[in-house]
Amino acid sequence: YYDSFAFINCKMDAHINTAGFRTESGKTQNPRMGTATYGFREYGTTNLAGAPINLSGRVGAYILNAAEFNQYYSNRARIFSAYNNGQGWNPQP
């Protein structure tokens, strides 16, 4: 199995460890290092005041660049495009 989650344009408070998100035992997630499309990904994270957070200390995280964000996560259709073997999914609010 793989842990797969992305924090996109999220606000995080100071209680979030600069190393990011690890298992309770201190081990990194599976896969050990994320990519633009799976694993632990992050883009545009700020503190509660809106100032960018330095993400360079994240353990096992893949920090998306602007091109990757635009390709995979910039709108609902792109986020769900790989669902069901590429057939996509358009959830309604």
Image (cartoon, rainbow, N blue to C red):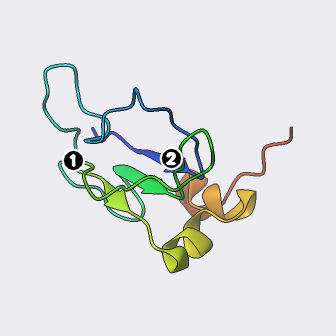
Specify the farthest residue to the bottom. 67
Q: Position of residue 9 (x, y in %)?
A: 60, 52
Helix, strand or loop at disc 1? loop
67 over 63 or under it: above or below? below
Asked if 80 appears above or below 48 in the picture, the reply is below
Residue 14 position, x and y percent, is 43, 32
Which residue sits at x=28%, y=59%?
Answer: 56
Residue 54 in the image, given as x and y percentages of width and height: 38, 56
The answer to which of 15 and 65 lies nearer the viewer is 15
Residue under the image location 14 percent in, 27 percent down: 26
- Tell me if 62 is positioned left or right of 6 in this view: left
Residue under label 2: 7
Tag 1 residue = 59
| Type of amino acid at the residue the image marks with label 1 | Val
Report the front residue among 16 and 59.
16
Say what secondary structure mark 2 lies in.
Answer: strand
